Amino acid sequence: MNKIINAVWAIMLTMAIVLTSCSDEDNESAADLSVAAFYPTIVMSGTEVEITGNGLSHTTDVLFPGGFSAQTVKVIDDNRIIATVPANIAETEDVLTIVTDGDIIKSRQTIRKAHTALRYFNPADVVKTYEDLQIEGNDFLLIKSVEIGEGEKAIKIDAFDFKRKSNTNITLTLPGKTPVGDNIAIKSYFENGDVQKLGSLSIEKGVQPGGKWVEKEIDLYNGGDVEMGGWSGYINTIYADAFAEAKIGDIIRVYIKDQTEGWQQGSFKHGSTWGGLTDELGVINLTSEDFERGYYEMTIDEVTLPLLQEAGLIISGCNYTATKVVLISI
């Protein structure tokens, strides 16, 4: 009888060990799957969203607001995937859901559909060539160029040449070859190929300036190279008083070098919360052109200026080295 009882206990113990082992493996798998960040957080159909984290190489689907599956999911490696936004993304802001063979995890960040709209031009009625035009509106993040005029005389200004770009403002200087006349059409071109007419303006010939702007560069950080690693490095010694004299339109520039791991991201973070100063500034995809130029930058606006003056700035990111941070005052 004792032999039978001992045999039964042995079987039960073996089953308990197996079940415990399986449970531990499942928990470890779930713990390994995580989402660190993604960009952009304001999207349109066809936008590519780059997602970083851990355990992503087994991703089978990415669900956008409304539960709609990504058009495509491209696995780069265990720490990065690229998902293409579906055509029928819901209007309501929500999280991303990452689906793998055995796990499902939701992001902490939220994502929403862009609703690009013009609020006003400044100047409102007539603008002159060689002068600045401010375009105020909503969800300008995905605009890659602005076209002024129509037909053969139209000119297109790429985002790289904007004097300023935020999610609510695009400021550009009208070149001398800008078409002039009444009701000149202004259109926006988006990264996914969409085109939207923003409105129209009267444009007149202006006087080409004879001088040039003088930039004043002030060191915010110049204490040696900082390797960012996989979001493990940072510069957190840029305090609020550094921005006491800063103004809207000033530029914060991060000098960079050493592309590593095949992809790089930069970040401008709130000096206290460590969150992005804005959604688009929290995760910035860096390109080969940025490294050839030697820096990435942001323009201080009415949203970010009070945040900087209240809490200062943290620079972070992944897979690059920051060499210096400066404030450029014009």
Image: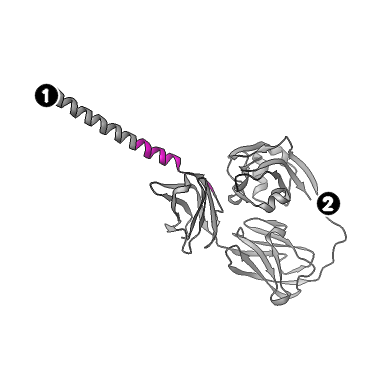
Residue labelled with disc 2 = 214
Q: Main secondary structure of the magenta part?
A: helix
Residue labelled with disc 1 = 1
Seen in the picture, residue 196 relative to 250 is either above or below; the reply is below
How far apart are the alpha carbons under marks 2 and 1? Answer: 97 Å
Tally of marks: 2
Q: Is residue 35 magenta?
A: yes
For badge 1, the amino acid type reads Met
The residue drawn where x is 82% and y is 54% is 213
Q: Position of residue 145 (x, y in %)?
A: 66, 64
Q: Is residue 66 visible from the viewing direction of this image? A: no
Which numbered disc, 2 or 1, marks the residue that appears first in the sequence? 1
The residue drawn where x is 45% and y is 40% is 32
Q: Is residue 190 left or right of residue 134?
A: left
For badge 2, the amino acid type reads Val
**Observer-nearest residue: 15 or 287?**
15
Residue most extreme to the right: 210
Q: Position of residue 312 (x, y in %)?
A: 66, 40
Q: Which residues are magenta?
A: 23-37
Q: Is residue 188 magenta?
A: no
The mark closer to the camera, 2 or 1, is 1
Q: Is residue 278 left or right of residue 152?
A: left
